[in-house]
Image (cartoon, rainbow, N blue to C red):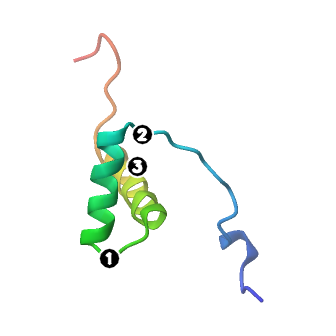
Amino acid sequence: MYADPTHIRDNEVKLRFNDEELALIEALARYNKRQRAALLRDLVLSGVSAMQMKPIRHAGIA
C-alpha cells in the first residue's frame, strides 16, 4: 500500500498543556484551518530545525 512503510506515522507522543496554552493552540488551529495534531507536529519539527541552525554553546566556553 505504501511505497516506503518507514514513513508511516505510528509513533505517539503525549503532550500536556494548561488551559491558556490549549486555548492558544486551538485558536491557531482554527485560524489556520488545520487539525491541532498536524499543527503541533509542524511546530515541533520547525522548532527542532531552528535549534539545529543555532551554534552549539558549551558551558564555560564563550
Pair 2/3: label in front: 2
Residue located 34% across and 59% down the image: 26
Q: Secondary structure beneath disc 2?
A: loop
User: Could you classify mark 2 by the number of other residues whose Cα lies within 10 Å: few (under 14), some (14-19), or many (20 or more)?
Assistant: few
- Please give the label number shown on residue 17: 2
Q: Earlier in the sequence, mark 2 or mark 1?
A: 2
Which one is nearer the viewer's eye here, 3 or 27?
Answer: 27
Point out which mark residue 23 bears. Answer: none
Spatial separation of the CA atoms under disc 2 and disc 1? 21 Å
Contact between marks 3 and 1 (CB within 8 A): the answer is no
Which numbered circle lies on residue 33? Answer: 1
Q: Quick one: label 1, few (<14), some, or many (20+) residues within 10 Å?
A: few
**Residue 32 pos. (x, y %):** 27, 72
In the picture, the quarter occupied by the N terminus is bottom right
Q: Secondary structure at mark 3?
A: helix
Horizontal side, residue 62 vs residue 52: left or right: left
**Residue 59 quadrant:** top left
Separation of marks 3 and 1 at Cα, in angstroms: 23 Å
| Quadrant holding the C terminus | top left
Residue, x 33% and y 54% (percent of image)?
25
Q: What residue is shown with label 3? A: 48
In primary-sequence order, the first of circles 2 and 3 is: 2
Q: Tell us which disc is closer to us: 3 or 1.
A: 1
- Residue that appears at 32% across and 43% down: 21
Left or right relative to 15: residue 60: left
Q: Position of residue 50 (x, y in %)?
A: 31, 50
Q: Secondary structure at mark 1?
A: loop
